Amino acid sequence: MDKDSAEKRIPELRKIIEYHNRRYYQQDAPEISDVEYDRLMRELQELETLYRDDELATSPTQRVGAVPLSRFASFNHPQAMLSLANAFSSEEILDFDQRIRRLSKMDKMDYVAEPKLDGLAVNLIYENGLFIRGATRGDGTTGEDVTQNLKTISSLPLTMKRMVQYPVPEFIEVRGEVYMERQPFSKLNHRREEEGEEPFANPRNAAAGSLRQLDPKITARRPLNIFLYGIGSVRGISFNRHWEILQALATWGFPVSPLIVQASDIAACISYFEYIGSIRPDLPYEIDGVVLKVNDLVAQEILGNVSRSPRWALACKFPAAQANTVIKDIIVQVGRTGTLTPVAVMEPVNVGGVMVSRATLHNEDEILKKDVRIGDTVVIQRAGDVIPEVVQVILIKRTGREKEFRMPHRCPECGSEIVRLDGEVAHRCVNLSCPAQIKEHIRHFSSRGAMDIEGLGEKVSAQLFDAKLINDPADLYFLAKNQLLKLDRQAEKSVQKLLDAIERSKTPPLDKFIFALGIRHVGERTAKLLAGHFGSMENLMQADVTELTLLNEIGPEIAQSIVEFFAEDKNRKVMEKFRRAGVSPQIKVSSSNAVLHGKSFVFTGTMESMGRNEAKTLVENLGGSIHSSVTSKTSYVVAGSEPGSKLDKARAQGVSVISEEEFLKLVDR
Ligand SMILES: [Zn+2]
């Protein structure tokens, strides 16, 4: 590229990269794959080394990352968190080894090799063994103070273990990666969809989004994990080798990946890279490569840094599981809540070892943004267990015969009009009797997390509906054996089994029943909360928006959705049918839950970790009760900060007074 074109391309690249940085770091919604991003970054780096300009100091290559959001306190890392140089092939790995042996004048170089987790990098400060503060990497110099959120990660030690081999230093920065395993990630996304929330694009975004929650209570509910892999500045202990640092971290009680190894030379590193690549699909979490670090810390020192990357480390990236294929059609699926999801039907193709023929296109906006058309050749990508998605259209393959997709104006299942509510990306079929919705609804009702009716999967519920035997979940309880025997592939034995399962489901736990009803925004957790607070269907059905929003976790949107559900004539009829069928939800306080059975509580002062309403729900869910005044029958007075006269009264009456911390222990929080 000549000087003139480079002068045009450089600012253009900076703009593009800055845009993607914002999408990635601040909005947790990346638009391009990491491979593409890395390609852009490398192009810019190469041009910048050839053609220096005045803007270099503020170039994204010098900052890497993004400005922290203003909502968290910003945190200056005592020692900057550098970014790693990348390699994409074994040639590049060999180049790296040659370069550093030349620069350090060492014939032989040994390394520590570790999997590169696809999560969020963090820096943790420990003083005299105590966890003091923790922050995200941010731009490497300044991150976001997420101390409270980090504390919710149960595998992160708040105090370092004191061991003889490695004395606890007076000050240390410990570096690691917060991540989410694939399985809990899928569960979390499933729950979000049930509750009408946008699912996360991948485990990394879920981890980042969770760690950067303003409310630590939300973070606490997210299945986050952490691995520690290095240190920044340290006072009070010194090391000779990187491997020694890892041993010390493990000894102090930090989770360290068991897959980290010492490699005697670069050939061993390359075999490790290949080995980790081969076991990658079997790991419970996502990785995007392998990191190599020079083991000898003196050599690290000699090598130093270049443009905000250490010369002594290298990130070797795996190629993303991507493939090209042709979109044969775009169909529309109708979900339980009537949401229409466009799905690409593709020429089957092997992506990272799995045959793929469908990919979600999320919604109409997404299709327009990517300009995906029927007949297009596209790049698709699959990351872990995440549903395959269309990354981009290969425009040069367009023939002009491609067809643009239009969201249908009528539901493909029932022909009702489709609406798009203000502020929603989704289109919906609002016909409550839409067959697609009813089938989905019945399937949800009988699913494991809900009523758990064995033998009533997707196929059988569709079969029952198509045979006009059921039109809503309550109809299940009026099915007769001879009706079922007339159905295809239904033998006496399986019919009896199904009827038995339906019969058994007549006394469901209240929360499961509420969840099974499929009220929009009411997932398993909200259902539990409602069951615990209201205690019966009758009470819940009578609650208004004001009463519902008194519960800590219920916002106006959820409250509205619940009230509207029970106000709907059709739903009231279904509830009545349940009653006639003898379906009677039970408030079950299981033995593990009833730890506070018979105990009465009085609260005074302010609690730090939760509001009064939440505490009340918590106590009641565990079988206890809450009172406003202290009597000799009170079991506990919980004293928060600035307690009132109730505290004196409790002492006078000899009632036991406990702190917030003790209360949390009692309720196992
Ligand atoms: Zn419909």
Image (cartoon, grey):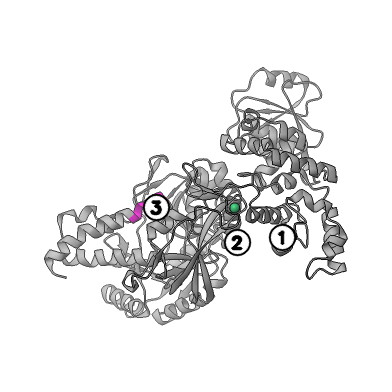
Label 2 sits on a secondary structure element that is: helix
Q: Is residue 146 left or right of residue 631?
A: left
Location of mark 1 (residue): 466
Would you say residue 125 is visible in this rendering? yes
Amino acid of disc 3: Tyr
Looking at the picture, which amino acid does disc 2 mark?
Gln
Instruction: Write down the quadrant of residue 54 in the picture.
Output: bottom left
- In magenta, the rendered stretch is 20-27
Question: What is the x, y in percent for residue 364?
Answer: 45, 55
Tag 1: amino acid: Asp
Residue 23 lies within the magenta run = yes
State which tag comes first along the sequence, 3 or 1.
3
> Which residue corresponds to mark 2?
183
Q: Is mark 1 within 8 Å of ligand 1?
A: no
Q: CA distance from mark 3 to mark 2?
A: 24 Å
Is residue 667 in view from this perspective?
no
Left of 533 or right of it: where is 308? left
Which badge, 2 or 1, comes first in the chain's sequence? Answer: 2
The x and y percentages for residue 285 are 54, 64
SS for dot 3: helix
Tell me, for residue 25, which label it has, or none. 3
- Compared across the picture, whether 624 is left or right of 142 comes to right
Bin the neighbour count of mark 1 within 10 Å (Cα to Cα): few under 14, some 14-19, many 20 and up.
few
- Does the magenta run of residues contain 393? no
